[in-house]
Image (tube, rainbow, N blue to C red):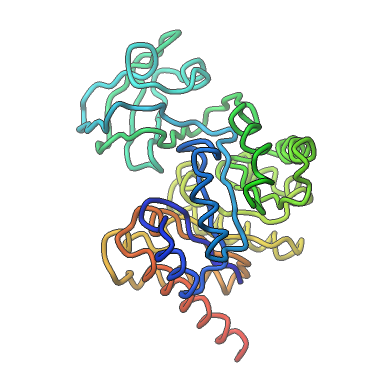
Amino acid sequence: MDFYATLGPACASEESLRALLQAGMTGIRLNLSHGPLAQHADWLALCQKVGVRQILIDLQGPELRLGRLESPVAVNCEEKLMLGLGGLPCPSQLILAAREGDTLLVDDGKLQLRVETAGPDRLYCRVERGGVLQSRKSIAAPGLCINMPTLTQQDLENLRLAPRLGVTGVMLPFVRGGQDLLTLRKALRESEAEKVLVFAKIENTQGVEKLDEILPYTDQLVIARGDLGNAMPLWQLPGCQKRLAARCRAQKVPFMVVTQMLDSMCRQAVPTRAEVCDIYNAVLDGAESLMLTGETAVGNFPVKAMEYLVKTAHCAVQDMQRG
């Protein structure tokens, strides 16, 4: 099995990376929604120096995100919030598509907004679930079909640079069908990066519905439960994960499970019982890879989190082998 950490301030030192490798990490992911690849070239050089052999970059792709904020913005329930011109920056495609009554989920659903008025260049919203808004956090709009390009200009620039920085895999968010992956593979060929593996992230209902169309064009499927959990009632997410895993097994396509595997370890040194059971069950379902995100990028216990991930997964493998 492969065990990925996400690169971030909490682990971007030689000492931390070596400790993660010692704990069983086999690869690392860099989320490019927070900055271009060139900006993180020193981090990737450090990864190569300590012996990280698998380096994944997570593109911006066809996803919705808040723009850059001068500082985090705390909002409370029932507050009014404006997105777009004169307010918080967000994609113009969202403003054009949203209508009165639509729900917007921000930062993997931590915050929830309701559109009260939709204008041509801004949305007036009411906060239904408060929290802290931060730069470049995801926005999900359940039920809306928003026309976003498969690759941004920044994605294309990142792909051109990827081979020189030791990148071995590319993750494409919000894959909507086979054409998204064909577009990515064409861009990889044009960047002389044909050997780079493609990881298709399933994060919306379009991806779930077009799964059979997607599987032939991906090297590994990623069950990305953050935004996927925004696309449906949360109680339906476990069943969706199980069905995606079963389809991957039937088609002999490797798959990865990611998001909140050990989320409590962002703050505490010991995970919950539910979290280790989640890891164990993902392995029993046939996962080829598991990935930590905030736990290693910004968490307080990145190495301990990797230890729990690897040890729990190995225990599951041993139990399966014993029958």
Q: Nearer the viewer, residue 4 or 113?
A: 4
Q: Position of residue 21 (x, y in %)?
A: 50, 70
Report the residue at 32% width, 16% height from top. 87
Q: Position of residue 261 (x, y in %)?
A: 43, 62
Q: Is residue 317 left or right of residue 194?
A: left
Identify the residue at the far top of this view: 120
Q: Quadrant of residue 102?
A: top left
**Total labels drawn:** 0
Q: Name the image quarter holding the C terminus.
A: bottom right
Q: Quadrant of residue 101?
A: top left
Q: Name the image quarter holding the N terminus.
A: bottom right
Q: Position of residue 164 (x, y in %)?
A: 67, 46
Q: In this picture, is 108 found above or below 155?
A: below
Q: Position of residue 216 (x, y in %)?
A: 79, 51
Report the residue at 62% width, 60% height from top. 54
Q: Nearer the viewer, residue 87 or 105?
A: 87
Q: In this picture, is 149 found above or below 107?
A: above
Report the residue at 30% width, 34% height from top. 133
Identify the residue at the far bottom of this view: 322
Report the residue at 61% width, 37% height from top. 158
Q: Is residue 123 left or right of residue 25?
A: left
Q: In this picture, is 124 found above or below 3?
A: above
